[in-house]
Image (spheres, rainbow, N blue to C red):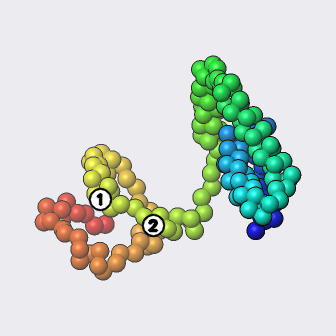
Amino acid sequence: MKKTLTIFAVIASVFAVILSVLPVSNLAIFPGIAALLLAGGAFYLGKKTGEVKKLVQFSFLLTIMALAVTTYKAAFTVTEVENTEALEAKEEEFEEAAIEELEGLELEIDEAELGDLEIDDAAIETIEIDEPQIESLEINEAELENLEIKANEIIESEIEASDLENLEIN
């Protein structure tokens, strides 16, 4: 058990030293605390048997150095963000360029992609059409031949008598 704790303490202290010199030095606290706890357990077990190894003391030394460097960097390193206006202007410029690029694209859409498209019928029913627009509407006979009306749609639709009076059949 003492050997296992000693090995894990040395590994944790080495990780603490490595993380303390990196820009993310605040993360060195976690392996540093783990190394102190593991080395303390190994020291306690070694003291109980009467032999304290130099490796446990070395682990303590590495951990204390790593925590000292981490504390120094946390206390004396100031993170400053300068000139955010320039960054915002660049971001706005990139956004405008992306919009212009998207507008310039000619997209081709397959009919297979439109198969899952659902249209809200409520929005279609609220569309108002002026009579001059209806008079200028042209329908080819070929389009009428391809038009299929389901029986359910005919039953559900309501036809008023005033609509039938204006109906002309050629």
Is there CB contact under 8 Å for labels 2 and 1? no
Q: Amino acid at mark 2?
A: Glu
Q: In the rendered image, which quarter contains the N terminus?
A: bottom right
Decide if residue 100 is in sight here. no
- Dividing the picture into quadrants, the one containing residue 64 is top right
Q: Is residue 134 left or right of residue 75?
A: left
Work out which residue is located at the far bottom of the displayed protein and give it: 151
Q: Position of residue 162 (x, y in %)?
A: 13, 61
Along the line of sight, the residue nearer the viewer: 62 or 74: 62
Work out which residue is located at the far left of the displayed protein and give it: 161
In the image, is residue 70 above or below residue 122?
A: above
In the image, is residue 165 above or below residue 21?
A: below
Q: Position of residue 100 (x, y in %)?
A: 62, 35
Q: Mark 2: few, some, or many residues within 10 Å (few <14, many ≥20)? A: few
In the image, is residue 82 above or below residue 68?
A: above
Q: Residue at x 18, y 68 (%)?
A: 159
Q: Which residue is mark 2?
A: 143
